[in-house]
Image (cartoon, rainbow, N blue to C red):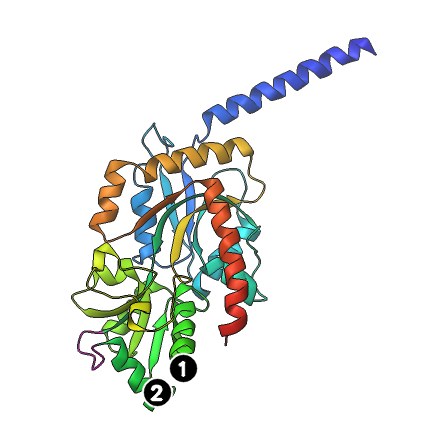
């Protein structure tokens, strides 16, 4: 029996050594990152900015390839990621909260919950804003509310999908102002913005970043946050205008991995992403594109998920259609 113990011990040591060597080499090929919205929207272009330096040896030393899997306000991509993405460290996904958390609570066909993924890091927080076409008769929030009161259901308001932050902000507005609005879910922020600019809907909720980039063609009537934002300092919050719409719809964006990913991979990813998010060049590019940054580490991101879920469980109980 003693003679048999030696080979087993050697095998165990060899396997540990191989595991350590493999971890030291990670990643040794490009990584794939699922973005659950179409190309060109705020999540997509921000994801490309914050990972643009991933090939640098001080980060991953490998490129991160974006794979767009849009549909159902992000649910198509997150369903795929929860069920099919390998947990080998080479598959990442962007997250949007409250979007994925609200959808996990509302839709029976959601294949994920808040516990289905490993939070890694957060790069930004993008408030929802209420926008109208440049030639809209609604010059103020009050104009829109007054018309909606006189014409129940006539005001069409779009957003990036069902139970994304935009939809939540619209539900809050309707409840707070005592009006009936008709919500039009789109397949992401980009088509939603295009529908507003083209006059296909009367108003829309969209990301501050997208509205900021298109401010020559849309007017921003209000911001769904607790305070004004430096990118659009002239735009008042809903609360400043007497309408109780808070910051529950603020769109937090970041990275998560599949559940069960190796702890050493998670640690390496967290450090690399935090270093990239805090890189001077990345920050400059984000500011130039009107993209608000709000960097959180893994622990803070997990705490954010818990807080958002608790808030949504109360909020959606009162306002969901």
Query: Label 1 to label 2, Cα distance in Å?
Result: 8 Å
Q: Is residue 142 left or right of residue 34?
A: left
Among numbered discs 1 and 2, the one appearing first in the sequence:
2
In this rendered view, identify the residue nearer to me: 47 or 30: 47
In this rendered view, identify the residue nearer to me: 241 or 165: 241
Image x and y of residue 198, in percent: 23, 75
Give the residue drawn at x 59%, y 66%.
Answer: 108
Is residue 273 placed above or below 110 in the rendered structure?
above
Report the residue marked by disc 1: 178
Image x and y of residue 162, in percent: 45, 69
Q: Is residue 4 left or right of residue 11?
A: right
In this rendered view, identify the residue nearer to me: 257 or 291: 291
Please state the total of marks drawn on the protein image.
Answer: 2
In this rendered view, identify the residue nearer to me: 239 or 144: 239
Is residue 247 placed above or below 117 in the rendered structure?
below
Give the residue drawn at x 25%, y 81%.
Answer: 143
Give the residue drawn at x 42%, y 72%.
Answer: 172
Q: Is residue 132 left or right of residue 93?
A: left
Is residue 137 placed above or below 192 in the rendered structure?
below
Extreme residue in the bottom direction: 150
Give the residue drawn at x 42%, y 62%.
Answer: 248
- Helix, strand or loop under label 1: loop
Image x and y of residue 171, in percent: 43, 73
**Quadrant location, the N terminus:** top right
Q: Are marks 1 and 2 in contact (CB under 8 Å)?
A: yes
Q: Which residues are magenta?
A: 133-139
Report the residue marked by disc 2: 149
- Helix, strand or loop under label 2: helix
């Amino acid at each position: 029996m003693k003679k048999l113990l030696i080979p087993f011990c050697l095998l165990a040591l060899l396997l540990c050594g191989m595991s350590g060597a493999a971890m030291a080499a990670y990643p040794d090929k490009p990584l794939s990152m699922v973005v659950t919205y179409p190309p060109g929207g705020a999540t997509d272009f921000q994801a490309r900015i914050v990972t643009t330096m991933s090939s640098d040896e001080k980060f991953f030393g490998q490129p991160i390839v974006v794979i767009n899997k849009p549909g159902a306000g992000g649910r198509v991509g997150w369903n795929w990621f929860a069920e099919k993405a390998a947990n080998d460290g080479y598959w990442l996904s962007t997250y949007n909260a409250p979007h994925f958390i609200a959808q996990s609570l509302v839709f029976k066909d959601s294949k994920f919950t808040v516990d289905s993924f490993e939070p890694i890091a957060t790069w930004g927080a993008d408030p929802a804003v209420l926008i109208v076409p440049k030639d809209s008769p609604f010059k103020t929030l009050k104009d829109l509310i007054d018309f909606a009161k006189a014409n129940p259901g006539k005001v069409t308001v779009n957003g990036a999908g069902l139970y994304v932050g935009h939809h939540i902000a619209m539900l809050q507005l309707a409840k707070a102002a005592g009006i009936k609005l008709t919500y039009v879910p789109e397949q992401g922020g980009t088509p939603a913005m295009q529908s507003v600019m083209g006059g296909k809907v009367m108003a829309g909720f969209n990301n501050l970043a997208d509205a900021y980039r298109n401010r020559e063609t849309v007017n921003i009537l209000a911001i769904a946050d607790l305070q004004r934002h430096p990118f659009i300092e002239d735009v008042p919050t809903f609360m400043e205008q007497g309408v109780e719409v808070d910051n529950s719809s603020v769109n937090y964006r970041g990275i998560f991995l599949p559940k069960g990913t190796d702890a050493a991979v998670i640690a390496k990813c967290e450090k690399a992403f935090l270093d990239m998010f805090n890189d001077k060049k990345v920050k400059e590019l984000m500011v130039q594109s009107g993209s608000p940054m709000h960097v959180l580490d893994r622990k803070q991101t997990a705490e954010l998920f818990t807080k958002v879920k608790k808030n949504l469980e109360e909020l959606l109980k009162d306002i969901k259609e």
